[in-house]
Each structure stands twice: as structure tokens, then as C-alpha cells.
Amino acid sequence: MTDEPTTTQPTSGDDDAAPAASGPFGGLPIDFSADTGAVPLAAAVTPIAFAAEPIGPAGVDGSVSLNGADHGRTKAKVVIVGSGPAGLTAAIYAARADLDPIVLAGSAAGGQLMITSDVENYPGFPDGIQGPDLMAAFRAQAERFGTHIVDVDVERVDFSERPFRLWARGVEYRGDSVIVATGASAIWLGLESETRLRGRGVSACATCDGFFFRDKEIAVVGGGDTALEEATFLTRFATRVHLLHRRDEFRGSKIMVERAAHNPKIEIHVNTAVEEIVGDAHVEGLRLRDTVTGEERTMPAEGLFVAIGHKPDSEVFRDWLEVDEKGYLKVHDHTATRIEGVFVAGDVHDHRYRQAVTAAGDGCRAAIDAERWLEAQAEADATTRTPTEARAAV
Ligand SMILES: Cc1cc2nc3c(=O)[nH]c(=O)nc-3n(C[C@H](O)[C@H](O)[C@H](O)COP(=O)(O)OP(=O)(O)OC[C@H]3O[C@@H](n4cnc5c(N)ncnc54)[C@H](O)[C@@H]3O)c2cc1C
């Protein structure tokens, strides 16, 4: 994950305040500065502890041993990589199936929902819930059933034999099976104003945030199918959608381009680059540059959807697992991969839906698949044991 550590600003504490009407993201700004102040979490859940696992002294080969009561487990029937909705749902299911999972949560523990405010489409929360609160609840539920969670990034894996081996901060973890749930990150324009105004009118998810832009004039930046699709979707809410593309031709499919071009609410601006997002507390406009003439102009807009792509966090696994042309992990037969015993869940393979609820559902499927596979392995091992091995196993 490439996003900086973020915190939500303390809110008024008025949970009943009308959400959508009070501006983008329900008027709940997110502070994306590097300030590490406290995250306001629902009283019912324990705040996520981002502290890394204490690390013991380095051995002669530079590796570090965490075996021992103080450092937690390093071996499990299932090691889950990632702690977004997919990873933590997998952990809940695996823990309840007595698989004693370890979750290597990543430095962006909690995943993408940690950088958003109102989540209004996750079932079970009729009044919506803050992203960090939802993820704290997921984590508390996984821990309740005995999941061991370590907030580290996996740097290297070896899936050549079982148990599978994974390394993080010099510590070796071993799993009889592995679930990869490392998610994806939105690709941003890289402007300072974009980072500052994320959650204050700047978004990378129309499905998630479009609702907050009812009766507003907004813009979408991008030239592929996602940008064309998001612009079309956003016309349900916005009065006008400006589609900004830095080239003169769209990469998206002909049918999507035509659909956007014929939509009376969409205005297409080719050869147009976003130089700056204007606004202090929220998006008020865009400073644009003509990529051919270099001419600059300002456009009023209350929101900007960045739709220039997503990057799956799959690098660590690419030597072992198949990826598509964009780097998304490939699955076969539901959640399985080409390596038996390694499963995949969530946005790291799913570039179609990219929602918390679908990622969570996928985590459930991967955990059930891992559990059934482990059981089949145990049965196969039992039938192939020699009498001596069978006696020793009793
Ligand atoms: C701003 C924003 C707002 C959104 N709003 C909504 C919304 O309102 N509703 C909705 O349904 N969806 C929303 N989404 C989409 C939703 O957040 C994602 O679909 C969902 O989080 C995907 O879950 P995941 O578990 O697959 O991956 P992620 O949430 O991306 O989690 C991936 C996890 O993997 C970890 N990781 C990555 N690499 C490593 C590594 N090498 N080692 C260990 N761990 C690693 C990360 O630290 C992270 O914990 C939003 C997304 C964004 C960016």
C-alpha cells in the first residue's frame, strides 16, 4: 500500500448528524497529513494497535527468532497475508475452524477502508460506519477467536515446499496453507492538493462515494474503461460530470466511449491534465492545463474522482503465483492458485467489484477452501502412513 498513514479528524461526536446532505463524505473530513493523533473509534471496539511485533536478537545469519511465549507464534495451519476485509474475514473463519491462523497484517493494517470516512454500503450498519471503526471491529472479531496478528509486511516467500515459508522483518513464518489477501491500491495523480483533499471531495471509488455528490458538478480524470464507467455512473447523482483525459484518444472500449459521449450530463475534455485541485477545506475547483497548447484554465467542481487505475499488491508473490497483465493474481477453481495450498482473496485478484463486502465474502471462501484442503491433506497423509508412522502419530 502506498498511502501515507492517515487519521480521521475528531468529529463533533454527533452520530445522528445528517450525512449526505452536509457535503462530500457527509461533511466528515479526513485529515491526510502525517499527524499520528488518535483515531476516534467506536467505544465498542478496541483501536487497532499498529505497533510491530517485538523483535528478538538477530542470529548469526541475521534472522531473528520469535519463537517463545513473548513473541507469539510463527507456525500455523493457515498464514494469512493482509488485514483488510478479505484477510480478516478469512481469519475469523479460519480461527472458528480451529486452524489457529496467523495474520501478517501489513504496515497498512486494516487495508483501504482505513483511509475513508463514511462507509454506507456495508450491510448491517443502517446509519453507516466509519472505515477505521469497521476495520477495528473486524480485527477484534478475528482476535476474539484466537487469531495471532502481527503488523508486518511480508517481504519474501518460498512456496516450493510445505510448510510454506514467509519472511517479514527477518522473521520466518511457516504455514501449512497460505491465504494471500494483500489488496490493491488506487493510483493517484501525485498532487499535493490531491492528498490534502482526499476524503474532502477527492475520491478513487465512484461506487463508494458517488452518493455524496448528489446535485453537484464534479469531474472524473482518466481515459480507460474505469473512468468512462465511473463518469457514466456518477451522472445518476451529479448535475454535470466533466471527463478529463490528458490524451486526445481514449484507451477505453468504443462502446463505453460512445455511451459517455452521448450522455447529456457528461462533458468530455481531451488533451486536458489536472495541475492542481483548488480548495482549502474541500474541493472547489480544478486548475487544468491543455497538454497541446500548455494553456491553463480553472474549472469549478465540487468533487474529483481519480480513475487512472489500481495497482494490485502482488509483487512479493509474482515468482510463485500467476498474475495477469496488470499484476492481479489469477485464481483457478474458486480461490485456489496453481500452488496447492495457497489461496487468494479480495482486491489482489478482483479488479471487477473492488468492494469491502465482496472482499470479505472472498475471504470467507478462501478460508473454507483452505480448511477443506487441509482436511483432505490430513486424510491423505493418514492413508499413506506406514504402520510405524501411524503408531508414532497416535
Ligand atoms: C478511499 C476508499 C474508499 C472506499 N470506500 C468503500 C466503501 O464505502 N464501501 C466499500 O465496500 N468499499 C470501499 N472501498 C473499497 C474497499 O476498501 C476495498 O474493496 C477493500 O478494502 C478490499 O479489501 P482487501 O482485503 O481485498 O484489501 P485491502 O483493504 O487493500 O487490504 C490489503 C491488506 O494487505 C496488506 N498488505 C499489502 N501488502 C502486504 C504485504 N507484502 N505483507 C503483508 N500485508 C500486506 C495491507 O497492509 C492491507 O492490510 C474504498 C476504497 C478506498 C481506497
Image (spheres, helix red, strand yellow):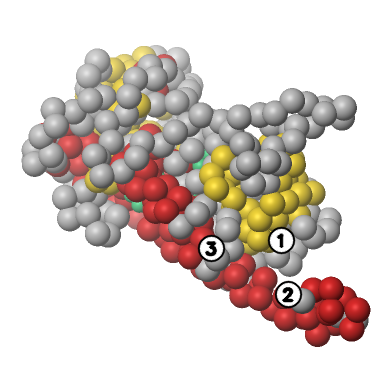
Question: Element type at marker 2?
Answer: helix
Question: Element type at marker 3?
Answer: helix
Name the residue type under label 3.
Ala
Asked whether residue 275 appears in the rendered view, the answer is: no
Q: Of 362 and 13, which appears nearest the observer?
A: 13
- Determine the image quadrant of residue 239: top left
- Determine the image quadrant of residue 72: top right
Q: Decide: marks 2, 1 in contact (CB < 8 A)?
A: yes
Q: Of 281 and 29, which appears nearest the observer?
A: 29
Circle 3 residue? 94
User: Earlier along the polypeptide chain: callout 3 or callout 2?
Assistant: 3
Question: Measured along the vertical axis of the image, is residue 241 above or below residue 181?
Answer: above
For the C terminus, give its image quadrant.
bottom right
User: Earlier along the polypeptide chain: callout 1 or callout 3?
Assistant: 3
Question: Measured along the vertical axis of the image, is residue 109 above or below residue 191?
Answer: below
Q: Decide: marks 3, 2 in contact (CB < 8 A)?
A: no
Circle 1 residue? 176
Q: Residue at x 24, y 59 (%)?
A: 124
**Disc 1 packing (10 Å; few <14; some 14–19; many ≥20):** some
Direction from residue 261 to residue 250 in the image, left or right: right
- Determine the image quadrant of residue 178: bottom right
| Mark number, residue 377 | 2
**Disc 2 packing (10 Å; few <14; some 14–19; many ≥20):** few
Residue 208: image location, x then y, percent: 31, 47
Residue 261: image location, x then y, percent: 34, 48
Q: Of 18 and 110, which appears nearest the observer?
A: 110
Q: CA distance from mark 1 to mark 3?
A: 13 Å
Direction from residue 334 to residue 15 in the image, left or right: left
